[in-house]
Image: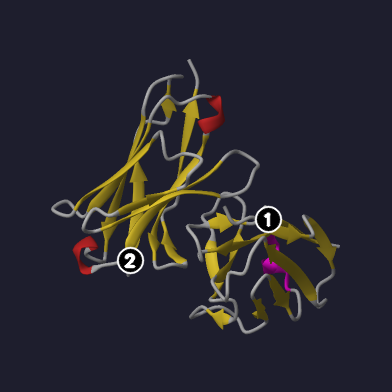
Amino acid sequence: QVQLQESGPGLVKPSETLSLTCAVSGYSISSGYYWGWIRQPPGKGLEWIGSIYHSGSTYYNPSLKSRVTISVDTSKNQFSLKLSSVTAADTAVYYCARDDAPLRYWGQGTLVTVSS
Amino acid sequence: DIQMTQSPSSLSASVGDRVTITCQASQDISNYLNWYQQKPGKAPKLLIYDASNLETGVPSRFSGSGSGTDFTFTISSLQPEDIATYYCQQYDNLKTFGQGTKLEIK
């Protein structure tokens, strides 16, 4: 059974970099599939951020591309998100997911608040 | 960028009703369209993939249809546990979600 778990600071200051990690269990990232990040501001809809393949190949939402870096660590079976120069508009629940093209397996999500 | 226009944004229906949600893509996306259900405080759950394929374990009252630019999601007989927000999502070019449809019980 594939399981994903997000972790990272729940509070980030404006202009700083948001960093989150997604630990995967029940499946080896090295075996395939893309792995992605999605976010949801409070009370709003879903926004896809980007995805990464186990080889390191990435594709990003053009609206966030200049600020986003997604990386993978196959030795730890996890992947990570960095979002730079954050503002209050980046406050959201951040989800990680296995990107089968459909987003079939999701983490429970973690709330990140941008505030001084 | 491909835009997804979902309607209605909210919907009130009675238990047992047939419920339909539509999703329109700004360009042809073939059948690269998925539907998700999200309950409050929970992660979205995949219900339908590739426009019309029912995800394993999902009740058969849920269905999807369409191709090209116009898609439909249907609940054949609404149950109380179906109260949630539903999203369409295209993956023909990157990924884009519709704005969501909040479904309530009348």
Disc nearest the viewer among 1 and 2: 1
A45 magenta-colored: no
In the image, residue A43 sits, relative to residue B48, either above or below, namely above
Q: What chain is tagged by disc 1?
A: B
Which mark identifies residue B100? Answer: 1
Answer few, some or many: residues within 10 Å of disc 2's Cα (few below 14, many 20 plus, some between 14 and 19): few
Q: Amino acid at mark 2?
A: Val
Mark 2 lies on a secondary structure that is loop
Q: What chain is tagged by disc 2?
A: A
* Residue A96 x, y percent position in the rendering: 40, 51
* Residue B52 x, y percent position in the rendering: 60, 81
Mark 1 and mark 2: span between their CA atoms? 26 Å
Instruction: Name the quadrant of the N terminus of chain A.
Output: bottom left
| Horizontal side of residue A20 vs A30, given as left or right | right
**Who's the residue at 68% across and 55% down the image?**
B100
Asked where in the image residue B34 lies, by quadrant, the reply is: bottom right
* Residue B60 x, y percent position in the rendering: 62, 84
**Who's the residue at 64% across and 64% down the image?**
B27
Q: Which residues are magenta?
A: B79-84
Q: Which residue is mark 2?
A: A2
